[in-house]
Image (cartoon, coloured by chain):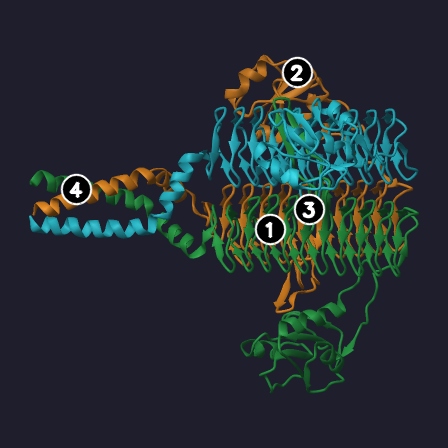
Chain colours: A cyan, B orange, C green
Amino acid sequence: MQNKKAAYTLGELAEIVRGEVMGDPDLIIRGVSGVKESRSDTITFAENPGYLEAAEQSAAGAVIVPDEVTDSGKPLLRVGNPRLAFAKIARLFVPDVFYKPGIHPTAVVADSAKIGQNVSIHALVVVDEKAEIGDNTILAPGVYVGPDVKIGNNTVIHPNVVIEYNTIIGSNVIIHGGTVIGSDGYGFVTDEEGHHKIPQLGNVIIEDEVEIGANVTIDRGTSGPTVIGRGTKTDNLVQIAHNVQVGPENLLIAQVGIAGSTKLGRRVTLAGKTGVDGHIELGDNTTIAAGSIVTKNTPPGVFYSGNPAHDHREELREQAARRKLPELLKKIKQLEKRVEQLELGD
Amino acid sequence: MQNKKAAYTLGELAEIVRGEVMGDPDLIIRGVSGVKESRSDTITFAENPGYLEAAEQSAAGAVIVPDEVTDSGKPLLRVGNPRLAFAKIARLFVPDVFYKPGIHPTAVVADSAKIGQNVSIHALVVVDEKAEIGDNTILAPGVYVGPDVKIGNNTVIHPNVVIEYNTIIGSNVIIHGGTVIGSDGYGFVTDEEGHHKIPQLGNVIIEDEVEIGANVTIDRGTSGPTVIGRGTKTDNLVQIAHNVQVGPENLLIAQVGIAGSTKLGRRVTLAGKTGVDGHIELGDNTTIAAGSIVTKNTPPGVFYSGNPAHDHREELREQAARRKLPELLKKIKQLEKRVEQLELGD
Amino acid sequence: MQNKKAAYTLGELAEIVRGEVMGDPDLIIRGVSGVKESRSDTITFAENPGYLEAAEQSAAGAVIVPDEVTDSGKPLLRVGNPRLAFAKIARLFVPDVFYKPGIHPTAVVADSAKIGQNVSIHALVVVDEKAEIGDNTILAPGVYVGPDVKIGNNTVIHPNVVIEYNTIIGSNVIIHGGTVIGSDGYGFVTDEEGHHKIPQLGNVIIEDEVEIGANVTIDRGTSGPTVIGRGTKTDNLVQIAHNVQVGPENLLIAQVGIAGSTKLGRRVTLAGKTGVDGHIELGDNTTIAAGSIVTKNTPPGVFYSGNPAHDHREELREQAARRKLPELLKKIKQLEKRVEQLELGD
């Protein structure tokens, strides 16, 4: 794996995240750290002034703080969003594990494939006919890229990923190991003889800045594309069926499943294990709690939970009421007796 | 990928699907299309007369219609089941992406393996000792076929699928990318020292005409086989545990999980994310709604939902009642007060 | 695949499982069997005296029985735990499918990797820079081992598994096909521009005697490790997020998902499809029923179910009460009328 630049001065880091240094700008930083694992040459962060004391008492050489902090015993890097600045600085120190430009001699690359500049094609990769791989893109060991697939620039495909024919993948995309893109959608016509396969003639389009987790499955569309919108991030073991349109900047947590032809707006968040029925639409900024089943369209901005999913506060009220149900049954029996007594007394 | 026959006359298509042409039988058709994507050389379909107008107003060269339609401004192909005829015609135009007879020089095929006629063994495939591959079968790149595995004819195994030793796979089977067949069943004997592995000595049998989705897992049996019955279709990320007997023509939608030794009848449908407990039996034509957990045997023909799954109409009534629970709690409190008043008034 | 020793005498088996023979110690045993599949040269077992008759009437050459059985028409092997003894004996006869010491010529092994004694590195395996593989360990075809990964002794990695950089795997570990270890944890900082990736700088540690199912995903920690404790066994399609600490001897059944930074005690059992929220702790010996969602810490020894998970007996009472809800609604309406009548009668 490539060794990135091993050290930055605090002043250099301030420039990169557009922050301001308080203290020695020539302080050498060799990595990021949580408060606990910090060393004199690492930088840590305090998301708000309440966390500052712990950061100051740590071994860290410097602390990233919100703008309002102006005083400390330690060198500070003041920014608008400390967590974001920390993420950006951390990225400077991550090893580019699969950065190794060139084509490994054991890779099988079709003559008709178009390979960009500075591409890393690792051992035992297959790039099939007429596939196009953009500049600086990385195909880790064991990746399969099917015929007519197009992949943009600066994209990283982790080991043993399968990308079937005609898939289009944008730039700055990350796809984790074992994921399968472009498998056939699940479509059959059933008669007395059995289930007859409906050919899946569409493809998958993955837009720029998308990250896809490990062992995810995304099926090709029936005639048009299945789409994963710009900046969307999926966790592991997510299932996206044919013709689904996932909007931009969605967060799809682990083991989510979305049935065919459903459309998700912008910034939809589906917590882990959520299932979404087919042929419905989820409005922008819809949030669904873990383990829910969504069966209907949702208006924008709602927070739903349950099976079937509905307003989360209502669900909580129902859960609370459900807890009282056994007791309630007794109460009603007593009430019936009391009413009977009253009726008899008449 | 192979170019299939690029064009058919309307008359040829009618013969293939046993339909009847109204209009020019020499019309050239070069593909299928939905109404929206149609061109003058594509054929579309109208499932019933209600959809006919849209199909007639499309750019399509011809329309597949039910028998009862006898009149149109466009050439017609009249059949008993337009959707089925469309699926069959669509299949004529799907590219055989992995059809490439021969053994790629980078494939590793044991001398003791038996390879049929016209088999496509792609780059970086491993076929282990004494495995048998039937005629016209396709092993896409990165597939692993273990020792003593038997695969029938006309079967397509997509990239990076793992088929472990002794598995038996029939003819006309499709297995999508990343799927693992024949992993060890999950069986342990626990004592104070820990969990001791029970060796899994059985295998997996996948019958003819089965389709298995992407990143599915099917475990080998403990001593006998795990069986996937003829014509069953599973979606992606489905888990089938050891000793499970899946009957013929089941539909197992994405992320379904079936625990050990359970037996499913004919034409069972499990919607997405359904879980089925071990050691139970589901009757023929059982249908389970998405996200349910099935804990008991089901009689034939039922439609169940919920956790634990029970009659779907009952579940809907309970859901409706649950929605009223918080309001109900208030009502009962009021009733109690009123009864108390009455009692005091006595 | 290697042929193990094909036959043992009953006396040899008794020594291996520390049992006692009644009958001929020179009887030749060539395999284990269930009662139904038994032959004169197989050994079966009767877990308790109630099962003895069936075992005695079978074709089996000998029967493993609990110590209290002292008399039989068949040769006996008396032990404290017949099921455990059966598992141990069965293991003697399982073929070591992937045992083939040496490095296959198509494997790509970095010069800087350290390979132990008697290691089997199969076709099309990649072992990246500075990885260390312990003695007798097996890497099946298509496995990827990343830079700086350390794997102990006697470990078996099944086909197409992905192990990313810096992962540490112990001895006597089994990892089934298609599993991905060390994918990036799911962490982002969101602002108006989108979701910014938080680099995942930690790793995964898998302790000794662990077994991981097929197509499982285990993410690397954000800065520290994600840990799978000694002797834990996971089933297939399980998701373990970044920073999770799974304790020793856990049983995580198929399709379980555990969100980030959660900590599981010793001998926790999560039944199939259970989801566990992030940043919580489950006490030792916690058991969760299938399909539950765990949202809070659990004390040791509890048996929980439901969404949100709570005491299983309470959940059962609530389920029973829920079944009566529609009827209850009617009852309350009637009560209201009766109370109204009484009130009017006043």
Q: CA distance from mark 1 to mark 3?
A: 14 Å
Does label 3 lie on the same chain as label 2?
A: no
Q: Residue at x 48, y 24 (%)?
A: A299
Left or right side of B327 for C314: right
Residue A222 in sight: no
Mark 2 lies on residue: B61
- First in sequence, mark 2 or 4: give its number: 2
Identify which amino acid the numbered label 1 is placed on: Lys
Vertical relation: C18 (above or below) A336: below
Does label 1 lie on the same chain as label 4?
A: no
The chain that hosts pointer 1 is C
The chain that hosts pointer 3 is C
On residue C263, the disc is 1
Left or right side of C281 for A322: left
Q: Quadrant of residue C16?
A: bottom right
Identify which amino acid the numbered label 2 is placed on: Gly
Identify which amino acid the numbered label 4 is placed on: Arg
Q: CA distance from mark 3 to mark 4?
A: 59 Å
Identify which amino acid the numbered label 3 is placed on: Ile
Near-viewer residue (B191 or B78): B191
